[in-house]
Image (cartoon, rainbow, N blue to C red):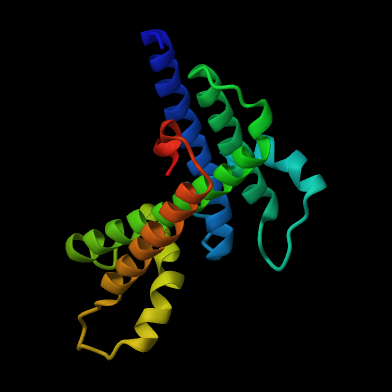
Amino acid sequence: MTGLNTAAIYVIQTLGSLYLLIVLLRFILQLVRADFYNPLSQFVVRATKPLLNPLRKIIPGFGGLDLASLVLAILVQLLLMIVTLTLMGYGVGGYLLQLLIWSIIGVTSLFLKVFFFALIISVILSWVAPGSYNPGAQLVNQICEPLLMPFRKLLPNLGGLDISPIFAFIALKLLDMLVIGNLAAMTGMPQILSPFL
């Protein structure tokens, strides 16, 4: 593999993963019923609109879920994996079903990572800027709230100390280790695709 191929893979994975994150955020924002008048939400909507609007004509939403954005995320992940493997010299013709499965695993992994890092940001903000009205802080809190709510119901009130993020971190990490890692191993995902996990 030449240095040019390595550089091309790096650029494609970085830019493609950034767009994949934006597409998945569109799904997550609708899933958690975030404020779509938030400037950051508006950016996500505008960035995904060109590819998402035609797809919505084919794939309608179901039960409040934006299935078109989820399908678009899987298709972007699939394309990234195909380009990566092709640039590495792998033939992908006979592996399309496996690639689709790996794409679903990759999108699920990114889904968990979005919540994990949103929780980290939320915890830091609760220390340095509690009750902030910053659009970014509000969006992070809106993403984290549905994840933290079940833990808050189970845990006793500790007089203003919220330990629900600790249990949410543990649950997300266990899902990542036990489900995502094992699924990737069971389906034979190549090491070159590990940046997508």
Task: Give 39 or 156, whichever is nearer the viewer.
Answer: 156
- Residue at (36, 88) in percent of width and height: 154
Number of numbered discs present?
0
Task: Give 185 or 45, whichever is nearer the viewer.
Answer: 185
| Left or right relative to 27: residue 158 | left
Name the residue at the bottom extreme.
156
Q: Quadrant of the N terminus?
A: top left
Task: Tell me if residue 152 can be seen.
Answer: yes
Q: Quadrant of the C terminus?
A: top left
Task: Tell me if residue 45 can be seen.
Answer: no
Task: Give 99 or 131, whichever is nearer the viewer.
Answer: 99
Q: Position of residue 59 (x, y in %)?
A: 77, 50
| Left or right relative to 49: residue 89 | left
- Residue at (52, 39) in percent of width and height: 20
Q: Position of residue 97 (x, y in %)?
A: 67, 41
Q: Position of residue 41 (x, y in %)?
A: 51, 50
Q: Quadrant of residue 156?
A: bottom left
- Residue at (39, 87) in percent of width and height: 153
Q: Is residue 179 above or below residue 95?
A: below
Task: Give 24 or 83, whichever is nearer the viewer.
Answer: 83
Q: Quadrant of residue 63?
A: bottom right
Q: Is residue 60 above or below residue 17?
A: below
Q: Position of residue 175 (x, y in %)?
A: 41, 63
| Left or right relative to 54: residue 91 | left
| Left or right relative to 170: residue 180 | right
- Residue at (45, 48) in percent of width and height: 185
Q: Is residue 31 above or below residue 194?
A: below
